[in-house]
Amino acid sequence: MFTKVLVANRGEIAVQIIRALHDMQISAVAVYSQADRESLFVKLADEAVCIGGPQPADSYLNMTQIISTAKLLGCQAIHPGYGFLSENATFARLCQQCQITFIGPNADLIDLMGDKAHARAAMQANQVPVIPGSDGVLDSADQAVQIAQKIGYPVLLKSAAGGGGKGIREVQTAAELPAAFEQVQQEAKLSYGDAAVYLEKCIGQAKHIEMQVIADNFGEVVYLPERDCSLQRHHQKVIEESPCGMIDAKQRQWLGQTVARATRKLGYTNTGTFEFLMDQDHHFYFIEMNTRLQVEHTITEAVTGIELVKAQIRVAANQPLGFTQADVKLNGYAIECRLNAEDPQHQFAPCPGKITALYLPAGSLGVRIDSGVIAGSVISPYYDAMIAKLIVSSQQRTTALAKMDRILSEMQIEGIKTNRQFLRQLLTQRAVQAGMFTTTFIAEMRQKGDEADVTSGVQNAQSEEP
């Protein structure tokens, strides 16, 4: 096992990784930017090194500084968390060249899954259903028009190197497509340095379903219960839950076995997440695979009792996973809300600033709050606006929803604006209460006004409790 690990991230995920390392009797090294000098994760680490200015390119994306720090302080491994360098194949290769373990899959698989067009082809080769669309990247807007005519509108143009909801345009007609194609190319080039674009059929009234896998170096591959991440705004997840109340045990097993088979055939190790759209007929279509820890991995931990960060570390240290598929039991329901420093009344504009007072009501059964801030912390304009992840669990979904509303009502935060009231409003919608929401629900709710209650969506497949 490792004795010292560098955490190449910040905020709540850095705090969580540091705590996991300490539980495993492993020394934790933090790297931080000048803007994060007083952050909680810096204070919790055994050693902390400032590696640059507040801009991510100068610090959390500075591969040379991160690896140099790891070598200088005798770290055997680097945990990238999520975001920043977590899905950067170049960084994973640099770690290997410098004889530092990258806690994640190997660089070749990061490359393969990072290119969405190549990932799509790999899934087709491994009998994972994909959305109808282009075979690989598009050569031109004219080619996109031809393919769209065959599969029918609406379609989505997507950046092959994209992720996190960026580089996506929905196109309703052939007349709109050439301009949209150019826009996606430009955005992809600006965001990812890669202008490659591919096309998919737009699946309407769908749920966004994802399933996490984890595999060790000894042939053990385990899938974990699905997560419903359909409550999104501009392709960014807002609330997630596990399991999905619209999916029955037979469907869960089929989907799990499908992704586990693909994981084995790919030779994939460590953790990853397969993301799907599920239509109203419960057909699943692969979207992408994230080769890292997910923000919402916490709800999977809540319903299984499996600590995923610790499992990642064990696998990276070439130890057996320590559990099998038979050991995975689904226990109740879990829901996560992302508490962000943003103003829903003004198009969710980021609201950086100093938190002058903070009360996060943890301490009751089935309540977990992951946060990297305390009273006095400053929400920086340079990074993601997430303040905390609020996670609740219960044997019944209805009681989990009620518990989440209580947590949101009790919490206090002063000095900045947050999306707290928006989250409470969202949880009271009848469609959300019933679990019958799709990826377009928030947009439709906002469009119709605060009192709207959009109930269209995937029909319930079960009434039983898991």
Image (tube, rainbow, N blue to C red):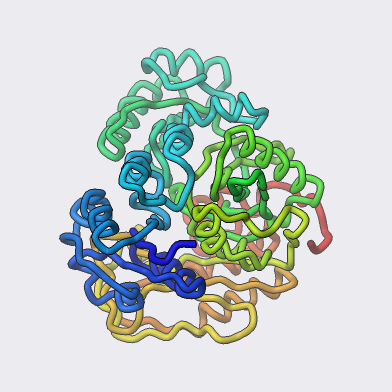
Residue 400 position within the rendered picture, expressed as x and y whole percent measured from the top left: 66, 73
368 left or right, relative to 279: left
- Give the vertical position of 195 relative to 18 (above or below): above
Q: Splitting the image into 4 quarters, where does residue 255 fall? A: top right
Q: Splitting the image into 4 quarters, where does residue 355 fall? A: bottom left
**The residue positioned farthest toward the left in the image shown:** 53
Q: Is residue 337 visible?
A: yes
Task: Give the quarter of the figure containing the C terminus.
Answer: bottom right
**Residue, x 80% and y 63% (percent of image)?**
465
28 left or right, relative to 246: left
Q: Nearer the viewer, residue 11 or 343?
A: 11
- Give the vertical position of 157 relative to 305 (above or below): above
Q: Nearer the viewer, residue 459 or 362?
A: 362
Q: Is residue 448 visible?
A: no
Count the labels in the image. Answer: 0
**Residue, x 68% and y 55% (percent of image)?**
225
**Residue, x 45% and y 74% (percent of image)?**
22
Residue 228 position within the rendered picture, expressed as x and y whole percent measured from the top left: 62, 54
**Residue, x 57% and y 60% (percent of image)?**
311
Q: Nearer the viewer, residue 251 or 185?
A: 251
Residue 445 position within the rendered picture, expressed as x and y whole percent measured from the top left: 53, 56
Q: Nearer the viewer, residue 15 or 104?
A: 104
Residue 306 position within the rendered picture, expressed as x and y whole percent measured from the top left: 63, 64
151 left or right, relative to 234: right
**The residue positioned farthest toward the right in the image shown:** 464
- Give the vertical position of 378 relative to 122 (above or below): below
211 left or right, relative to 95: right
Q: Splitting the image into 4 quarters, where does residue 176 fall? A: top left
